[in-house]
Image (cartoon, helix red, strand yellow):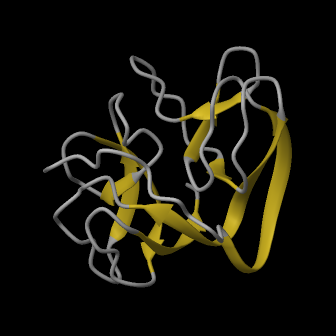
Amino acid sequence: MTAISAMPDILTVVEGDYKARSYIAGGTIYRGSACTVDSNGRAVVCPITGTTKPCIGVALDAASAYQPVTVVYEGVVNVANADDTTPIAIGSQVSVKAGTATYAGAVIVAGSTPDTQIIGTALTTIAGGSYGKILLKLR
């Protein structure tokens, strides 16, 4: 895997109907990043290194620490492929890429090493270093 060097600029995160919840950001969050909550209940980009906190959804907008942020927990969302070269095939289950780097909050094919929980299914082929649609279905 060749990690992306930066999160792509996802212009539109959701398509169609969705369910979301508001949080206060615990740090910098990029639009389209998978999020979890920290020990204070604030939304942060996931995963948190060294923890197994589950993904709570995908950020609808960008936010800085202590700003409000809306996190989508159900619906069709655009997310970044954490791999710069390998596409994610349509129909693949996707999970959040584990670790810390520019790809925090991006997704990979479920079962790749290392990954975290499955968060959805790819509805389009997601090119390496780009973003595409998934059906967000948290388990």
The picture places residue 72, in percent across and down from the top left corner, at 72, 58
Q: Is residue 67 left or right of residue 84?
A: right
Total number of numbered discs in the rendering: 0
Up-down: is 63 above or below 40?
below
Q: Nearer the viewer, residue 68 or 123?
A: 68
Which residue sits at x=28%, y=49%? 4
Q: Can you give x and y, in whole percent of width and height, for residue 35 in the image?
A: 60, 41
Q: State the image coordinates of residue 71 (x, y, percent, origin top left).
A: 74, 50
Q: Residue at x 56, y 64 (%)?
A: 10
Picture quarter containing residue 102? top left
Q: Residue at x 64, y 51 (%)?
A: 57
In the picture, which quadrant includes the C terminus?
Answer: bottom right
Say whether residue 15 is left or right of residue 124. right
Residue 74 appears left or right of 98: right
When the figure is inspected, residue 124 is found, relative to residue 60, above or below; the finding is: below
Quarter of the figure with residue 63: top right
Give the residue displayed 58% in from the left and 66% down from the top.
Answer: 136
- The image shows residue 26 at horizontal and vertical percentages of 70, 23
Height in image: 27 above or below 33? above
Viewer-nearest residue: 1 or 95: 1
- Vertical side of 122 occupied by 112: above or below: above
Rendering quarter of residue 118: bottom left
